């Protein structure tokens, strides 16, 4: 991992955002996801379906 | 808005850094992390495109079209979108988790390869310095993303 990436990660973690800390925990764990963790990922999919960023819009003119 | 975007892609930075290091995670755990990282990656990309649409459209309309490929469509018979690919891949990881046969493993790996292809397609847009300049951190993230174990 290059130093710039480490710095960026640390900056994010130090910003104290619980979501980021949770993502870090899940994406670095060595074991399989627990039932609750799997449910969290599945909840992400559901959230994306409703997110404005995920709605198709017409091309700009 | 820029700060929000940077926050949204941070988990992906973490994910790709972990995968580059090749931590000793189980096959199922890796599969779960791969789909999870792809989800974060797709979300970061569609958000990046939406937040920078006017500038990106002027640079390369293909960026919006790639994002649209991931987005929801109100059509049951349309090609699957990003969330469907994620759900399908996640399901196949779950099938292998509960029944670890070679066939199920192969199906899981095929599904992960499909979402890796999508990541590769997205990443290619960030090779354009004009696109990358809109958010250098995002560009660095996608240039390095390799999710498949």
Image: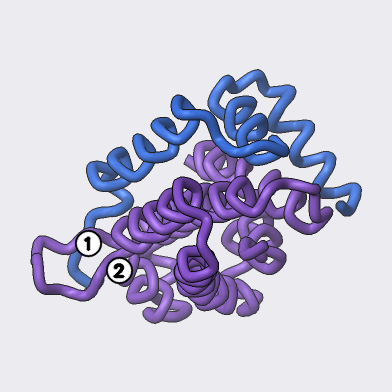
Chain colours: A blue, B purple
Is B130 displayed left or right of A41 in the figure?
right
Q: Position of residue B28 (x, y in %)?
A: 58, 50
Q: Is residue A49 above or below residue A57?
A: above
Q: Chain of mark 1?
A: A
Comparing B54 with B139, the one in front is B139
* Numbered badge on residue B68: 2
Is the C-beta separation of discs 1 and 2 under 8 Å?
Answer: yes
Say which quadrant the C terminus of chain A sits in.
bottom left
Q: Quick check: can you spot residue B45? A: yes
> Which residue is at 28% across, 43% downward?
A51
Q: Quick check: can you spot residue B122? A: no
Residue position for label 1 = A56
Q: Position of residue B2 (x, y in %)?
A: 53, 43
Q: Residues within 10 Å of mark 2 (few under 14, many from 20)?
A: many
Is B37 displayed left or right of A10 in the figure?
left
- Looking at the image, the residue that sits furthest to the right is A3
Q: Secondary structure at mark 1?
A: loop
Q: Secondary structure at mark 2?
A: helix
Q: In the rendered image, which quarter is residue B136 located in?
A: bottom right
> Which residue is at 58% across, 72% downward?
B123
Comparing B105 with B57, the one in front is B105
Comparing B26 with B113, the one in front is B26
Comparing B119 with B4, the one in front is B119
Q: Chain of mark 2?
A: B
> Which residue is at 23% across, 42% downward?
A50
For marks 1 and 2, give the CA distance. Answer: 6 Å
Is B74 displayed left or right of B126 in the figure?
left
Q: Position of residue A8 (x, y in %)?
A: 76, 41
> Which residue is at 89% across, 53% downward?
A2
Q: Residues within 10 Å of mark 1 (few under 14, many from 20)?
A: some
């Amino acid at each position: 991992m290059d130093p710039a990436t480490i710095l960026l990660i640390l900056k994010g973690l130090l910003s104290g955002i619980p979501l980021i800390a949770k993502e870090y925990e899940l994406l670095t764990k060595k074991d399989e996801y627990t039932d609750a963790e799997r449910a969290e990922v599945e909840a992400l999919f559901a959230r994306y379906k409703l997110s404005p960023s995920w709605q198709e819009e017409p091309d700009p003119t | 808005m820029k700060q929000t975007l940077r926050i949204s892609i941070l988990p992906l930075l973490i994910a790709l850094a972990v995968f580059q290091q090749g931590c000793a995670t189980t096959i199922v755990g890796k599969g779960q992390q791969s789909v999870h990282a792809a989800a974060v990656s797709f979300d970061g990309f569609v958000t990046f495109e939406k937040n920078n649409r006017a500038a990106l459209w002027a640079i390369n309309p293909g960026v919006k079209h790639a994002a649209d490929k991931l987005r929801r469509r109100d059509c049951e018979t349309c090609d699957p979108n990003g969330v469907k690919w994620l759900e399908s891949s996640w399901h196949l990881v779950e099938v292998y988790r509960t029944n670890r046969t070679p066939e199920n493993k192969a199906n899981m790996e095929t599904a992960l390869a499909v979402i890796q292809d999508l990541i590769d397609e997205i990443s290619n847009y960030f090779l354009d310095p004009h696109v990358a300049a809109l958010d250098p951190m995002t560009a660095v993230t996608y240039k390095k993303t390799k999710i498949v174990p």
